Image (spheres, rainbow, N blue to C red):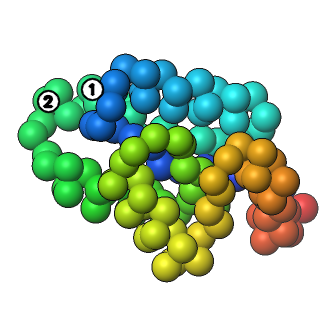
Amino acid sequence: MKRQAVIYLATPMTKGEWVTNWDKCLIIADRLRIKGYAPYPPVVSWSWQQHTRYTPEEWLQYDFNLILVSDGVLRVNGDSAGADREMDFAVRHNINTYWSEHELYQGQDPYIDMPEVREATE
């Protein structure tokens, strides 16, 4: 059995034109999904934030947990101290990091072989 590689998108959220940043992130997420990946664009948390008042640091700590269960982190272009910290976190925890979609497509298969699952289902 194979599963889709989970790719966390480290993206600018609060600096610059936020609508442009979010649109760019979601367009990239859609391209990744079409290519077979399982992307996680953290901008989808925006509607959750409308019902809570977590600080940016609390969101970042939450996102670190999502990065730990990801197969890779793709940095979306744009100025962002938080996205830079997410990339640093991924490097420190030996999670694949990619600075462009092209680099991701060269280095990460969208499907990951899971022999332990295959053995259990045969």
115 up-or-down from 74: above or below: below
Q: Which residue is mark 1?
A: 47
On screen, residue 115 versus residue 103, left or right, reads: right
Residue shown at the point (25%, 51%) measured from the top left: 59
Q: Amino acid at mark 1?
A: Ser
Q: Amino acid at mark 2?
A: His
Picture quadrant where residue 114 is located: bottom right
Measured from the top left, where is residue 111 in percent x and y? 80, 51
Residue in the foreground of this view, choosing between 101 and 109: 101
Position of the C terminus, as image quadrant, is bottom right
Give the Cα distance between marks 2 and 1: 7 Å
On screen, residue 53 versus residue 10, left or right, reads: left
Q: Which residue is mark 2?
A: 51
Measured from the top left, where is residue 9 in percent x and y? 52, 46
58 up-or-down from 38: above or below: below
Residue shown at the point (36%, 48%) measured from the top left: 80
Label 2: which secondary element: loop
Label 1: which secondary element: helix
Picture quadrant where residue 49 is located: top left
Residue in the foreground of this view, choosing between 63 and 85: 85
On screen, residue 104 versus residue 24, left or right, reads: right
Position of the N terminus, as image quadrant, is bottom right
**Residue 27 appearing in the image:** yes
Residue shown at the point (46%, 69%) measured from the top left: 88
Q: Tally the numbered discs.
A: 2
**2 and 1 marks in contact (CB < 8 Å):** yes
Residue shown at the point (33%, 54%) measured from the top left: 82
Residue in the foreground of this view, choosing between 67 and 14: 14
